[in-house]
Amino acid sequence: MKAGPLAGLKVVELAGLAPAPFACMILADLGAEVVRVDRATPGADVLGLPNDPLARGRRTIGVNTKTAEGVELVLKLAETADVLIEGFRPGVMERMGLGPEAVHARNPRLVYGRMTGWGQDGPLSAAAGHDINYVGIAGALEPIGRAGERPVPPLNLVGDFGGGGLMLAMGVLAALHERTTSGRGQVVDASMVEGAALLTTSLHGMRAAGVWPGERGDNLLDGGAPFYDTYETSDGKYVAIGAIEMRFWGDLVKVLGLDGPDGEELPVHVDKSQWPKLRKIVAEAVRRYPRDELVARAEGTDACLTPVLSPWEAASHPQNAARGTFVDIGGTVQPAPAPRFDRTPPATPEAPHEKGADTEEVLAELGFDAAGLARLREAGAIA
């Protein structure tokens, strides 16, 4: 049995892209035994990347779900599983014979997790889309960007991962908790639109309270405020500044050397009418230093000034190194499982297995002997 707070939990994953695999990665990281159902002919499979961290920590079987025997294999897996997760468009699993009704007929305790962009119903439910489309209609894309410029896509972090896979994993765990009293599974309908919208909850509160009155790039947390933004240093690198509170701003002023006897009178930092002038002063002060020198000046203070690191630099930052925030798995440096658990810490995940590599092992656990495996191969259910 794997280590971690979800040790003993059995999950069946139907292979897909980005958000559903991310949800399954989280569950596997925390100790769940996840079996991913890949295509029986992985050479024709365009899903995923070599040594893809999203595929870490679970076994994989190759199944042809276009055959009756392949569908039956997935149903057999589901019979003894706690969770099934899929990320297809609405109706696809039903047409395969693997929809919630068919699966719950075999295992009414199973939690059936569904990951889509738009949700299982609604006028857009059958339409194609990607992260940028989902966060666009969720209201999560429009506020991101500079004043007077177009919105900037936040990679695919808000829809696919934050509002998608992470929300699905949370929903699955909530349904498992409810099952402890009801004894029944249920369907978890996770939509990237709804998850991304949920991430904007505080913006709606700030807007209603008049704290977010401006347009894009003209507010407290969107780069509008000069004390909450990124600045270029003398060596062409960047620092992030988040000195919102007065005492933090006071520390920043000292770090930037703006408190000397010859310094000009600084504008009040929360006076929005003075933001253009203050931004120029801060930018000029930051540009006097190389990034790492300025970061060193800020150490030991509450100036809220940190380096802007690339994902590839982040692992070597002293805080991340001390905490083991990144690990090397199969030669690829990547984020470690999170969060932390004091009694049931998870182990470092295994490197991704080759697609279908565990087919015989998993099917043997289901009771298939050599003759049974031969019959499945003959039927085209497995490679």
Image: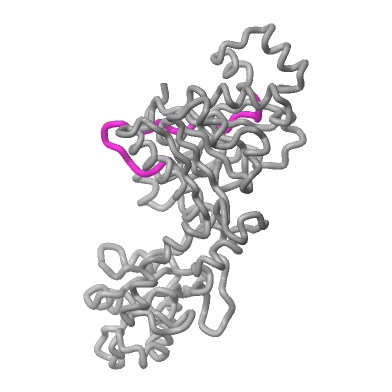
Q: Is residue 243 above or below residue 373?
A: below
User: Quadrant of the rendered structure where residue 342 is?
Assistant: top left
Q: Which residue is at a point 68% across and 13% down the rendered structure image? A: 373
Q: Quadrant of the N terminus?
A: top left
Image side of residue 362 versus residue 202, left or right? right
Prevailing secondary structure of the magenta residues = loop
User: Quadrant of the rendered structure where residue 31 is?
Assistant: top left
User: Quadrant of the rendered structure where residue 270 is?
Assistant: bottom left
- Image location (x, y in percent) of residue 306: 38, 64
Q: Identify the colour scheme used.
A: one colour
- Image location (x, y in percent) of residue 14: 60, 36
Closest to the observer: 351 or 69? Answer: 69
Q: Which residue is at a point 67% across and 38% down the rendered structure image? A: 95
As for residue 355 lying within the magenta part, the answer is yes
Q: Is residue 239 above or below residue 373?
A: below
As for residue 67 lying within the magenta part, the answer is no
Q: How many numbered discs?
A: 0
- Image location (x, y in percent) of residue 159: 53, 57
Q: Which residue is at a point 35% across and 88% down the rendered structure image? A: 272
Image side of residue 165 versus residue 269, left or right? right
Q: Quadrant of the C terminus?
A: top right
Closest to the observer: 295 or 145? Answer: 145
Q: Which residues are magenta?
A: 337-357
Q: Which residue is at a point 34% across and 72% down the rendered structure image? A: 205
- Image location (x, y in percent) of residue 303: 29, 70
Q: Is residue 197 above or below residue 352?
A: below
Q: In the current view of this chain or complex, which residue is farthest to the left? A: 247
